[in-house]
Amino acid sequence: MLLPEDVIVDIIARVRRCDYPNLSLVSKNFRSLVASPELYARRSLLGCTEQCLYVNAELENSETPEDRLYILRRKTNGNHRLVLIPSLPAMPRNGKYVTVGSKIYVFGRIYNHHKTRSIALSIDCISHTVQPLPSMPINLIVGVADFIDGKIYVFGSGENDLNKVKMLVFNTETQIWEKDIIKPDVDIDLNWPRYVVVMHKMYVRVSDKTFVYEPNESKWGTDEMLNSKRWENACAVDDVMYYYSCLGKKLRTYDPKKRCWGVVNGLEEAEKRNSWWSDTVNYGGKLALFFPELELERRTRQIWCAEISLERRQGGEVWGKVEWCDQIMVPENFFLIKALAVMV
């Protein structure tokens, strides 16, 4: 502690963020330092920001099921584990999550005294605190939401007219909702399931149809090629879509420029696992794949995560390499809802 404070901040800023919980145990000064905005400003200045993985999960079969946020941390033995963030309250049930920089935006509904209302909030992943956002212009039942060019597009239906699809736009720079309510000029029925992925445009899958929204031109359309696969829980890396097909046990790709499907080669061992759902997230240009594995004898659900690096080779082939694969949660009643990557 004889070092000047600026030097200490400069050193700690270079340390991996996953080691900060251990550093906070050293002293009160360190505990204050690792929670300070100045430290994260220095990390950004030094180019030491990194992506951290969060998940929204629910403990099923409990008396009061709640959606809570967890962070994926590397333990001292090198293993990865999901750790509950106790400072964050329960999240809206069936909420939709969008990451922008070091924040997670949540859009959903809350239930109180047999009444429901729309809610929007942001989570600061540096301080792990929650701030409410301005109220939505209309009471919207949110189906999907995603981020393009500084704006979050929230897609759903009005509470009093479930057959009328509407889209609200939240400006993340001004932190206000835009006045115009976008009404699609294509016939969209908000059936389940609903998924969304952004590759310059917003691709929304509703049931077996994929709709495309171009924000710059405010134009809607369809993509027949995407309709040929039942893609789900997809993410985009370098404007190519990735999703894991549990039925085909393949990590599939879709290139919107070439309008063609493909598979990620080199993952034969990882793809042998017995999974019935999965989630993917862009993890700093790599792919984080979350999936459960079922042990038939014990009937225990184990949640696993794999980090996969991607390589585009000549001819357009995509090859993957598993950097690590770890069991991150074991309890039988744990259900992972959404995985998120946040830059801090």
Image (tube, rainbow, N blue to C red):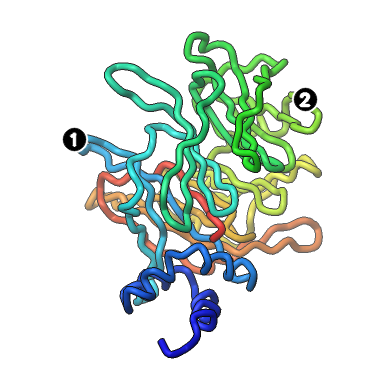
Res 204 visible: yes
Give the numbered dot on residue 219.
Answer: 2
- Residue 104's place in the image compared with 22, above or below, is above
Horizontally, residue 73 falls left or right of residue 183, namely left
Q: Quadrant of the C terminus?
A: bottom right
- Is disc 2 placed on a helix, strand or loop? strand
Residue that numbered label 1 is attached to: 63
The residue at the point 51 percent across, 41 percent down is 105
- Is disc 1 placed on a helix, strand or loop? loop
Horizontally, residue 313 falls left or right of residue 8, namely right
Give the numbered dot on residue 136.
Answer: none
Crowdedness of circle 2 by 10 Å Cα count: few (<14), some, many (20+)?
few
The residue at the point 48 percent across, 68 percent down is 324
Q: Quadrant of the N terminus?
A: bottom left
| Snapshot quadrant of residue 47 | bottom right
Q: Are marks 1 and 2 in contact (CB under 8 Å)?
A: no
Looking at the rendered structure, the kind of residue marked 1 is Glu
Horizontally, residue 192 falls left or right of residue 297, namely right
**Location of residue 10 in the rendering, given as x and y in whole percent from the top left corner:** 55, 79
- Residue 291's place in the image compared with 217, above or below, is below
The residue at the point 53 percent across, 57 percent down is 288
Looking at the rendered structure, the kind of residue marked 2 is Lys
**Location of residue 30 in the rendering, given as x and y in whole percent from the top left corner:** 38, 75
Q: If you read the primary sequence from the N terminus, does the residue marked by circle 1 or circle 2 appear first?
A: 1
